[in-house]
Image (cartoon, rainbow, N blue to C red):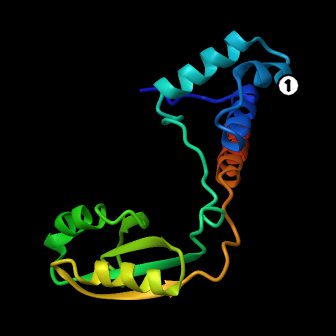
């Protein structure tokens, strides 16, 4: 299967959608000096190719009262319990991310809590799941980087550099 190639218009469309998934196609079209139909067709093609998967919004958890962020590394008694443990983790709404990992932990989770006491309760919930041997928590003092565009720009620029050698 041939690899789908993005051009500069596609990159600019992605930039604007990453910044704001709700931006109207007509606004994108005006900024790029193309028709709204062109934007629609290009977005549809990127969706069909699997480059764009769904859309989402970013929540400001602090404004919702969830000031505490921590990462909880989970050690399992047996790796074969991973699926079961992930199903239990999924039942805890304060866990916003969970990754199966290699290395020190079997699973690492991001949790959001109102305060230290609430975080402690969430960590105890994780620790109480059958199959969890122990947990190790790292408290986030500050989110210093959360940039969805940087990797895309690197991929685009690298692709241009690679294509210049071909």
Measuring 75% from the left and 33% from the top, which residue is drawn there? 12
Q: Position of residue 90 (x, y in %)?
A: 30, 61
Q: Position of residue 74 (x, y in %)?
A: 32, 80
Q: Is residue 79 left or right of residue 112?
A: left
Q: Is residue 64 left or right of residue 154?
A: left
Q: Quadrant of the C terminus?
A: top right
Instruction: Indicate the quadrant where residue 35 lies.
Output: top right
Q: Quadrant of the N terminus?
A: top left
Q: Position of residue 158 (x, y in %)?
A: 69, 48
In the figure, 126 relative to 151: above or below?
below
Q: Is residue 139 left or right of residue 79?
A: right
Of residue 60 and residue 136, the one placed in the foreground of this image is: 60
In the figure, 103 relative to 163: above or below?
below
Of residue 6 and residue 115, the one placed in the foreground of this image is: 115
Q: In this figure, which residue is indicated by the disc labeled 1?
A: 31
Bin the neighbour count of mark 1 within 10 Å (Cα to Cα): few under 14, some 14-19, many 20 and up.
few
Q: Position of residue 18 (x, y in %)?
A: 67, 42
Instruction: Indicate the quadrant where residue 76 lies.
Output: bottom left
Instruction: Indicate the quadrant where residue 123 lies.
Output: bottom left
In the figure, 42 relative to 117: above or below?
above
Measuring 36% from the left and 71% from the top, which residue is drawn there? 101
In the figure, 159 relative to 28: above or below?
below
Give the SS element for disc 1.
helix
Q: Is residue 47 left or right of residue 164?
A: left
Measuring 59% from the left and 45% from the top, which residue is drawn there? 57
What is the number of callouts on the image?
A: 1
């Amino acid at each position: 299967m041939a690899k789908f190639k993005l051009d500069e218009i596609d990159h600019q469309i992605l930039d604007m959608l990453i910044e704001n998934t709700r931006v109207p196609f007509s606004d994108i079209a005006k900024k790029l000096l193309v028709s709204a139909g062109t934007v629609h067709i290009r977005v549809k093609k990127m969706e069909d190719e699997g480059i764009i998967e769904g859309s989402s919004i970013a929540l400001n958890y602090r404004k919702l009262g969830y000031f505490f962020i921590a990462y909880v590394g989970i050690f399992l008694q047996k790796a074969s319990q991973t699926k079961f443990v992930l199903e239990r983790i999924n039942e805890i709404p304060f866990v916003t991310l969970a990754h199966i990992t290699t290395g020190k932990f079997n699973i690492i989770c991001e949790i959001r809590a109102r305060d230290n006491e609430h975080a402690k309760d969430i960590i105890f919930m994780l620790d109480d799941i059958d199959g969890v041997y122990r947990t190790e928590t790292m408290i986030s003092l500050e989110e210093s980087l959360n940039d969805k565009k940087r990797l895309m720009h690197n991929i685009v620029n690298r692709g241009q550099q690679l294509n210049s050698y071909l």
